[in-house]
Amino acid sequence: MRETLIYLDNAATSWPKPPAVCEAMCAFLRDSAGNPGRGGHMLARAASETVESARLALAELIAAPDPKRVVLTHGCTDALNIAIHGIMRSAIVRSCGERPRVVCSCLEHNAVLRTLHCYEGSGLIELDVIGCGSDGLIDPSAYLAECDERTVLACLTHASNVLGTIQEVGVIGAGLRERSPRGLFLVDVAQTLGHLPIDVEAGHVDLMAIAGHKGLRGPTGTGALYVGPRAFPDDPDQPRLFCERRGGTGMKAPGLEMPGALPDALEAGTMNAVGFAGLLAAIEADGGADDAGTHESALLSRMLDGLRAIEGVTVFGLPGVDGRMPVVSFIIDGVHPRTAADILDRKHNIAVRGGVHCAPLAHRAIGTGEDGAVRASIGPMNTGEEIDAFVDAVARIAESGGE
């Protein structure tokens, strides 16, 4: 690893991780690496305790009323797939030949867009995609206008991974309950959890997809899905999110049916217990989320001011730091975004990401098309000196035309 590396790709995954993450994972492998829920011996019990502690910590972070409704997953994409496939399977079975309707925004990640596209492309659902303004804001009124009594699912990213714009989740969630009483609200908090306060009940959220390796600063391969009582009622006779994944749980044997209660109903297979040991350590080590947010906002303001002062650089999204995450997308006249990102990496030891960031409709909405943009995303470990070095490097690329 280059000692002088300036890492500005925290929207993809946070780096560096807290030292406690590595220490906890090594300790788990050394002392507790049984298979959670698969046996009553000491190592299995120790692994189960670690996993349940991680579940409880995540539940507290999102103000979930019951930690058993936090289903541990292999990441945010896994969580989104469990939610979308489960809802679609259940809704299609109950639709009696009438295609269910789904609403999402143009800012969604491919984990949402591609998953929904497979149903729309097969003619199984009607999909409405809501556009955004040039600032990346979704108009709640426009979003809700597309929701009706046939809407079974509404998807919304809490903040765009391209523009960082924070959406009015609570307003849309409350409106959806009125306009589409049977519609479920799925919110992707991959870019916000760990940065902003999250409350699933205050946001009227039925399903929430969580990434463990971004704002929470845990290891990759960790995530969770909050499953609210409207999506998975306690009454087994009520319509539920269908369990697509089946296998061993260790909690119901013998028998060929999956357990009927959460979280086991949606947690088939051996989970990434060592990863959750690391995630738990990251959550416990954080402790300074408010200070980190203030620090990141100051750096974001510094970056925005610096980039906008460079001739030939166009910055997208909201004009200031209010209402946006520490994510900045920009283009340099005459320089392909991937070329600019490569120059920043090879010549300046600065890690950013060029391209469409797995969000093609977001780039179409802001006019960057298939080329995309350069994205720089700030983390709590970045410094003002690093931001200045980054801005200076971008200025050199703009001046040289990428040569």
Image: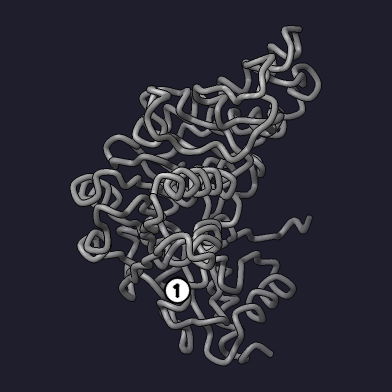
For the C terminus, the image quarter is bottom right
The colour scheme of the drawn protein is one colour
- Secondary structure under the numbered disc 1 in the rendered image: helix
Task: Tell me if 284 is positioned left or right of 207 in this view.
Answer: right
Tell me: residue 94, above or below residue 275: below
Residue projecting furthest to the top: 41
Residue projecting furthest to the right: 30
- Asked whether residue 209 is in view, the answer is no
Task: Tell me if 234 is positioned left or right of 119 in this view.
Answer: left
User: Quadrant of residue 292 in the image?
Assistant: top left
> In this orientation, which residue lies closer to the viewer: 293 or 140?
140
User: Quadrant of residue 6 in the image?
Assistant: bottom right
Tell me: residue 55, above or below residue 359: above
Task: Tell me if 349 is positioned left or right of 382 in this view.
Answer: right
Q: What's under tag 1, amino acid-wise? A: Gly
- Asked whether residue 339 is in view, the answer is yes
Task: Name which residue lies at 77% across and 58% down.
Answer: 2
> In this orientation, which residue lies closer to the viewer: 369 or 27?
369
Give the image location of residue 294, x and y in percent: 38, 48
The residue under label 1 is 306
Task: Name which residue lies at 67% across and 81% down.
Answer: 339
